[in-house]
Image (cartoon, grey):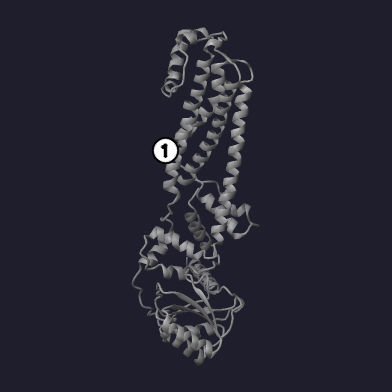
Amino acid sequence: MLDIRVQRAELVRILHGRGHLFATDPAQIDQVLRHDAAPFPERLLKRAALIDSDEQLLQRVQRSRQQWRLLLLAASVLLLVGGFSASSTLMAADTVNFFHLLLALLGLNSLMLLLWLASLLPGRRHRLPAWLDPVLWLRRQDELTQAQASLYVQYATSPALRWYAGMCSHRLWLCTLLGVWVGVWLMLLVRQYSFNWESTLLASDSLVQWVACLSWLPSQLGFVVPDAEAVRHSRLAADSTTARQWGSLLVGSVLCYGLLPRLAAWLWCFRRWRRCAGQLPLSEPYYQYIVQQWQQQVVDADDGGEPAAPQAPPLRLSDDPKWALLLEADWPDPHWYRAVLGQAWQNRGVLASRADHSECLARLSREPAQLLLGVRAHRVPDRGLLRQIDALARAASSGVVVQLLLPEEVLDDSTLQQWRHALAERQLTWLDPPVWAQRQRGQNETAWQQKSDEAA
């Protein structure tokens, strides 16, 4: 019902509010996109794509969409065959009552189309009942499944879903009517029918006028229709001489009063859906907060008397090639650099010796690059390692970004604070360990919420 990019952004919104740990820290992406020139809606979609750097959410959305398309295709084929079978069954006899057959073929479709038109009238939209909350029904499912179900429930009364549901309904009716139309055509081609009509209340002259109104639109499209004399002769009599006219009117009526109105309704829903499907709900507080953070330029100084935590210099990304380097030794995760800032970092290995360090400096003197340096933050920063970082920072034309790495089982951030102070003194930009930073931020938000509740 939604554009894939919008679905991913909405899933990020829901999961972020539930404390989900993403492959890329959303705070880093917010910092990267702060000075992006794109409009805010496009920037928010780009933000979701960068946060979902492992494409876990994208794959989930694509898989769900593919499953729904297969289900819709199966239903379409089934109704196409069902429409064909229904028309063949209704035309099993050689003598057919025209109006009875037309009512059987188009009656339910016309009634449902009128009900759909009535649903478009302005009125109050009610919220879904609380018992439809997916949390109550999907407790044993994974977090992504719950978030996806919550997204669909939230959009259950939205214009996007209303128009998409209309598209699906009209598509299924179109398949049914197409099967009916093809079935009528084939039966008229291979069999000889005789048409008549019966009525207790209507006289022949009245039926002439009714048939004239019914025949006007098909006649404009080139279908042969019965004239007044043919209508009078067909009452209570199976006149084979007028069968071609009645058969042509039957085919034209199914097309003009069944297929074409449904096609027009589908096109109308599709047009309205396209307008809604690609729009983010920017009125959500989550998006409002992010936009306000991007617009904020001045931050008040902290004069509360407590020593301020070291702040990383502003992050600046260049268009130069981006190299990822590990210092001293390998890291357990060989892809530690892939999700950093949503950039395409090139793995340049490990600087494990002085020879590696000298070779890297020589290459940086010849080639412009921006470096991503991975360092172990659970070890105390020693002078030799800091001098190595200083040398690389001077040699890199676009500077360095230091990614602090911390094993997930390490909870003590005392050495992390030492790294922050050391890098702040050198005016070097650093990034906290992504998973650790998200956990700490979630704990701080929980503690702040508890204090607010106690104060209230």
Front residue of 392/198: it is 392
The structure residue drawn at horizontal position 46% and vertical position 21%, both measured from the top left corner, is 223
- In the image, 278: left or right of 188? left
Q: Residue furthest right?
A: 140
Residue 20 x %, y %? 55, 65
Q: Is residue 217 above or below residue 369?
A: above
Taking 62 as reference, is 249 above or below it? above
353 above or below 122? below
Of residues 69 and 113, the one drawn nearer to the viewer in this rendering: 69
Farthest residue toward the left? 298
Residue in the foreground of this view, choosing between 223 and 176: 223
Q: Is residue 421 visible?
A: no
Q: How many marks?
A: 1
**Quadrant position of residue 400:** bottom left
Report the residue at 57% width, 31% height from top: 179
The reply to whether residue 209 is visible in this rendering is yes
Residue 422 pos. (x, y %): 46, 87
Looking at numbered disc 1 in the image, what kind of residue is underneath it?
A: Pro
Q: Residues within 10 Å of mark 1 (few under 14, many from 20)?
A: few
Q: Secondary structure at mark 1?
A: loop
Q: Position of residue 380 (x, y in %)?
A: 54, 88
Residue 263 on image: x %, y %: 47, 34
In this figure, which residue is indicated by the disc labeled 1?
A: 122
Q: Residue at x 52, y 21 (%)?
A: 250
